[in-house]
Image: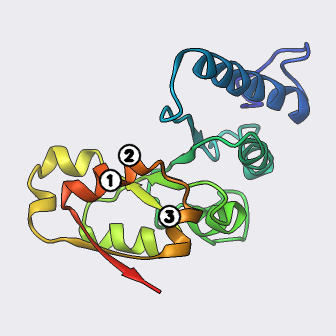
């Protein structure tokens, strides 16, 4: 997808349309193989770096259409890779709206949205969920503090309609519930 790194001049490079063609071909092929070899519980997600720092690198002008195409392809989830999920925003713009707020509006619960990026406390995780994420990805914080989730439950309020709208496979939802990390509260 990166115009900086993708220097091809054939149908897989150059224009945004051509660069999207490759990403969608990969999704199509993975879905084809999964349909042949996996059962219905197999989920397919797509991890996205929203922007590159190079002047001619990936920008939201590239990734927003990618996200729309991925939603249309009915991927099981989108996973944003960010440095600091709560504050990262466009580098070359006056728009300082954090990416997760902007992308959660774009996705609008059509597929589950996950992000990684400095979720190193339960408070930051709660803010990420409040800003529109369906799940937060936690990595280095658990390496630094393996007992992070034993300290306190992170509450998550869900209505019946939200459970359906985040489209998590029931087996995945039950595994998350069974972890006991989240204190689920179901509202009407």
Residue assigned mark 2: 171
Task: Give above or below for 128 relative to 32.
Answer: below
Asked whether, in this view, residue 155 is left or right of residue 18, the answer is left
Who's the residue at 53% across and 61% down the image?
88
- Residue drawn at x 38%, y 46% as measured from the top left: 171
> Label 3 vs label 1: CA separation?
18 Å
Above-or-below relation of 163 to 127: above
Contact between marks 1 and 2 (CB within 8 A): the answer is yes
Percent x, y for residue 136? 39, 57
* Residue at horizontal 43 percent and vertical 51 percent from the top: 170
Q: Rate crowding at label 2 as few (under 14), some (14 to 19) or many (20 or more) other CA atoms within 10 Å.
A: few
How would you rate the neighbour count of disc 3 (Cα within 10 Å): few for under 14, some for 14-19, many for 20 or more?
A: many
Question: In which quadrant will I find the N terminus?
Answer: top right
Report whether 155 appears left or right of 7: left
| SS type, badge 1 | helix
The image quarter in which residue 167 lies: bottom right
Residue under pointer 3: 133
Residue labelled with disc 1: 174
In the rendered view, tell whether residue 39 sits above or below residue 71: above
* Residue extending furthest toward the bottom: 188
Residue 165 x, y percent position in the rendering: 59, 64
Element class at badge 3: loop
Asked if labels 1 and 3 touch by Cβ distance under 8 angstroms, the answer is no
Query: Can residue 19 be seen?
Result: yes
| Residue 110 numbered mark, or none | none
- How far is disc 3 from disc 2 in space, using C-alphas? 20 Å
What's the residue at 61%, 15% (across, down)? 36
Which numbered disc flags the more N-terminal residue, 3 or 1?
3
Q: CA distance from mark 1 to mark 2?
A: 5 Å
Q: Earlier in the sequence, mark 3 or mark 2?
A: 3
Query: Can residue 131 be spotted in the picture?
Result: no
97 or 115, which lies in front? 115
């Amino acid at each position: 997808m990166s115009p900086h790194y993708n220097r091809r001049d054939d149908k897989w490079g150059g224009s945004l349309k051509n660069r999207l063609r490759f990403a969608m071909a990969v999704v199509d092929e993975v879905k084809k193989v999964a349909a042949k070899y996996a059962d219905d519980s197999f989920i397919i997600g797509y991890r996205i770096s929203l922007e590159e720092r190079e002047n001619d690198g990936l920008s939201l002008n590239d990734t927003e259409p990618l996200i729309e195409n991925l939603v249309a392809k009915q991927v099981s989830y989108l996973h944003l890779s960010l440095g600091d999920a709560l504050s990262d925003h466009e580098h070359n713009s006056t728009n300082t709206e954090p990416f997760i707020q902007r992308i959660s509006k774009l996705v609008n619960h059509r597929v589950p949205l996950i992000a990684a990026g400095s979720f190193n406390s339960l408070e930051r995780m709660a803010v990420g969920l409040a800003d529109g994420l369906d799940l937060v990805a936690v990595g280095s914080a658990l390496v630094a503090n393996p007992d992070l989730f034993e300290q306190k439950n992170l509450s998550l309020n869900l209505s019946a309609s939200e459970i359906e709208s985040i489209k998590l496979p029931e087996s995945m939802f039950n595994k998350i519930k069974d972890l006991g990390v989240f204190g689920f509260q179901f509202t009407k």
